[in-house]
Image (cartoon, helix red, strand yellow):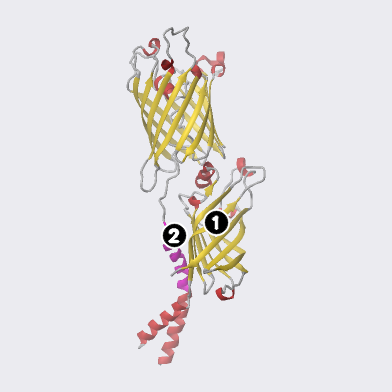
Amino acid sequence: MKKVILILCLILSQIGVGQTYFTRTGFTEFKASVKAFEPVEAKNNSTTVILKTQSGDIAAQLFISAFKFRVALMQEHFNENYMDSDKFPKAVFRGKIENFDLNSISGTSELDLKGTLTVRNVKKEIQTKAKVSKEGDKIRLQSTFIVEPGDFEIKIPNIVKKKIADKIIISIDYELVEKK
Amino acid sequence: MFKKYFSLVTILCLAISPLSAQDDLLDELNEETIQETKFELPAFKAMKIGNLQSTKVADKGDLYLYVSHRFGTLQNGIETFFGLDEANTKIQLAYGLWEGVQLSIGRESLNQTYSSALKVRLAKQSDQMPFNLVAYGTANINTQISKTGFPALKFGDRMSYATQLLVSRRFSDRFSFLVAPSYIRQNLQNLNLTRASNHNQLAMGLGGRLKISKRMSINLDYAYNFNRDSRSLYNDPLTIGVDIETGGHVFQLLFSNAQSTNEPGFLSNAEGNWENGNIFFGFNIVRVF
């Protein structure tokens, strides 16, 4: 009897987790361009994202080396000199969309997105707004936030300091489908 | 008794579930993430180690400008300002035509040589492939020699060629090494200098780099020519240099006993000699567009 209760209880507590939405082809972009200089920006089209619709819990990760630049040499320097992507291959975000309720979303809702971004093993708290919309059976999530190279102990040598912005704009656009 | 136990278990379950959900999400994320083949970063920063070609190939659509300078011999000292008065300049454009295919054209003032080269990447070092493999071929036209000096000169005599297989490995983020079995064809041999005619030559190139900081490395390359006559006035080329990388540029400062920067030039006809200080100071500047 006790065992039955225990098992029942465990099952019940797991049901509460609800549905999972995910993608493997999320779009993440960053821009560190300075006007009048070569654009310093790159796109990543293989971000993996998981969203729990019950709680609004969200996690995302991407491979640093999958960021594509316009000039391949810049990409190489980005990986080798700034991000040390052989030592720190991934960037991970773990957070929560506040007051997330799948059923009450109609059109586009703007919700608070909070969490921790880990790059180069350094953690940074992120607080921003996220646009959440329902498109058919997909959930679309868009957001923008700003980080600085110093947040993740990335050193920029003096010789290129003028060509790289101090504020880096990160944009995300994820289309999540239900995981069955 | 039963009620007490039930409530205890319930509290326990509720307490456990949000905790496990936290960690589960990152685990679940890792399960969803597809691990792709992880390619190593390139073994060398520039297309050349010093004189020898490296396994680096221009990426598709990238245009590189190479300006190479080799001053005259240091041996003559202040008389030629350590070779400044006798500089050899080469300008070269390299373009990534397709992924892993690079085409280049160049002009060198030594022997007024036009050169063209094709570089094709065959394999890239990754967690499944231990080496970078690149094939390289170049054809050179010497436009300086004239009928005055060589009355029987035909156009074909102006040509020289080199074909190389470049095999490199990035052993660590600091150390990379390359071997380059090479075949050189010289249509014209000046017997006053080579003593015996060796139109077809085989050589083995060796090169390496050691990074001393994120943006600087010490480079060395050498080639052993198997077919050079022992009485030949030419030597095997040895080049020692430093790479300094700044954003879109790479500066390569070097000393070599070869003045030519073209493969048929330095692999066959290195005119200098390290032993008696008959060496050349030079640099390559690499700029990407």
- Magenta highlight on residue B31: yes
State which chain disc 2 sits on. B
- Magenta highlight on residue A150: no
In this rendering, would B250 be left or right of B51? right
Q: Which residue is tagged 1?
A: A28
Q: Residue at x 58, y 49 (%)?
A: A41
Q: Residue furthest bottom?
A: B1
Q: Which quarter of the picture shows residue B51?
A: top left
Quadrant for the C terminus of chain B in the image = top right
Vertical comparison of B49 with B114: above or below: below
Q: Does the rendering let one see residue B270?
A: no
Near-viewer residue (B48 or A2): B48
Q: Amino acid at mark 2?
A: Thr
Residue B34: horizontal and vertical position, in percent? 42, 58
Quadrant for the N terminus of chain B in the image = bottom left
Q: Amino acid at mark 1?
A: Thr
Q: Which residues are magenta?
A: B19-34
Q: Residue at x 44, y 31 (%)?
A: B118
